Image: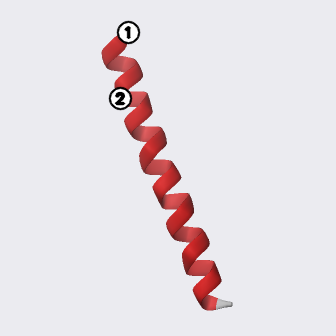
Amino acid sequence: MIGTIEAIRNMIGTIEVVNILLLILAMWLV
């Protein structure tokens, strides 16, 4: 269970980082 929770947290963290990078790219393009 703990390992699964950590894996999900890592996936969410990665998605958040990607979203932040996309926002920065969008701001640069605009």
At label 2, the amino acid type is: Ile
Q: Residue furthest right?
A: 1
The quarter in which the C terminus is drawn is top left
From what the image shows, is residue 10 above or below residue 21?
Answer: below
Give coordinates of residue 20: x percent, y percent. Answer: 42, 39
Give coordinates of residue 15: x percent, y percent. Answer: 52, 51
Give coordinates of residue 2: x percent, y percent. Answer: 61, 90
The quarter in which the N terminus is drawn is bottom right
Q: Which mark is residue 24?
A: 2
- Taking the spot 58% from the left edge, 87% from the top edge, the residue there is 3
Is 24 placed left or right of 14 in the picture?
Answer: left
Quarter of the image where one finds residue 5: bottom right
From what the image shows, is residue 17 above or below residue 26?
Answer: below
Give coordinates of residue 16: x percent, y percent. Answer: 49, 49
In the picture of the structure, the residue carrying the numbered disc 1 is 30
**Spatial separation of the CA atoms under disc 2 and disc 1:** 10 Å
Kindly state the secondary structure of the residue where label 1 is placed: loop
- Taking the spot 42% from the left edge, 49% from the top edge, the residue there is 17
Does label 2 or label 1 sit earlier along the sequence? Answer: 2
At label 1, the amino acid type is: Val
Badge 2 local density, few (<14 within 10 Å), some, or many (20+)?
few
